[in-house]
Image (tube, helix red, strand yellow):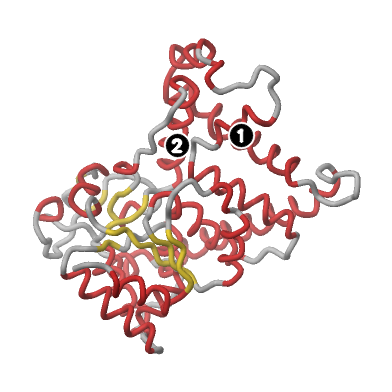
Amino acid sequence: MLRFTVNPRDVYAERVNGRRVIYLDTNAWSDLTERATDAARRAYDAAGALHNAGVTVFPLAYATITELLKREVNEDSTSQAEVMDVLSRGVCLRGDPHVRDLEVMCAYQFMTQGISVVPIPEMFTVLACYISDREIPAVGIPGDGGLLQLAYPTLRWLHSAMRTPQLLANEARTDEKYVRLITEKIADAPNWATDGSGKLNAKKLRFEEHTAAFKNYVMANLSRLVGLEGLSLIREKSDLYVKKSGGPGAVATVIGAMPSIALSCEMHVQKLLAGANTRKQDFYDHEHAARAIPYVDVFVTADGGLLDLIRKSKSAIRSDCTILNGMAALADYLEKLPR
């Protein structure tokens, strides 16, 4: 079997650059595919016209792909996979290990240069790499020129080939682990993060999240990414980002240079403040928002709980991403785009 590797910059240049980047969460994809409402039919027609005109790309991600793979292979799920294949142009946001490394390098730039540039051209890949970049099989599906002259596997193919008992068991363990960890954090927070009134203190929660991210993401990976010489440069340039008094501000400024990680931290803070019961679906909601919002032009969901969490986490959203609530808002938005 022929194998080859993917260069994300090539994917970005051929599939993303110059197009309006619109991310749909799983429920939005289902609504768009089923077209059970007038708004969904309008959105579907407009999305198809804009796709044909080369105006848009609707990238997928770990959460959207995994939630589809967990569904039974039937007429409805196959139809949704086909719609996702077309509108996504085979594009997917990169997997967590690569987003982490890219954003850690953003933090490094900030710590050594005082500024950082988010590497958007490196944040997109092909959908077969939805977990992490790897050598992937090429299959005999007609490409449409350029990078895809030799086509990558489609989502429909992945759904039929990858939906195995082992995959379902692995994802179930991931879901359960997330629920367990967040439930434990919510239960433990009152023991250390309350203020004088006995209420949870957002600053204490935020400092804890930022410190953990700095330790587990930045410091745990910098030596591998920049070496000892790079680490020494941080010490030389520490006045660029560390306040002389130290404290939470220094860590917060570093985390703020990492868009996805910063948003993920703030979403966790808001979940702890809310103290609500954690569901398995919350993991995917978190992945949808934290991964996509920093790197796309438009984010679409009709999930009221997720919309509220995004609103409460607004302070950590550095991008000018437009948040749309459901099919009617998406239809209105798409119908106004020039073709």
Q: Position of residue 167 (x, y in %)?
A: 45, 61
Q: Which residue is mark 2?
A: 103
On screen, residue 162 above or below 15: below
Amino acid carrying label 1: it is Ala
Q: Position of residue 189 (x, y in %)?
A: 79, 48
Q: Nearer the viewer, residue 285 or 175?
A: 285
Report, in whole angstroms, how far the alpha carbon at label 2 lies from the one at label 1. Answer: 14 Å
On screen, residue 251 above or below 44: above
Q: Position of residue 217 (x, y in %)?
A: 54, 34
Q: Nearer the viewer, residue 248 or 13?
A: 248
Q: Secondary structure at mark 1?
A: helix
Location of residue 130 (image quadrant): bottom left
What residue is at 43 percent from the left and 62 percent from the top? 299
What residue is at 45 percent from the left and 37 percent from the top? 103
Q: Say which label, 2 or 1, has the lower sequence index.
A: 2
Q: In the figure, is residue 125 to the left or right of 37? A: left
Q: Nearer the viewer, residue 161 or 264?
A: 264
On screen, residue 13 above or below 39: above
Q: Which residue is mark 1?
A: 252
What residue is at 17 percent from the left and 63 percent from the top? 54
Q: Position of residue 235 (x, y in %)?
A: 54, 13
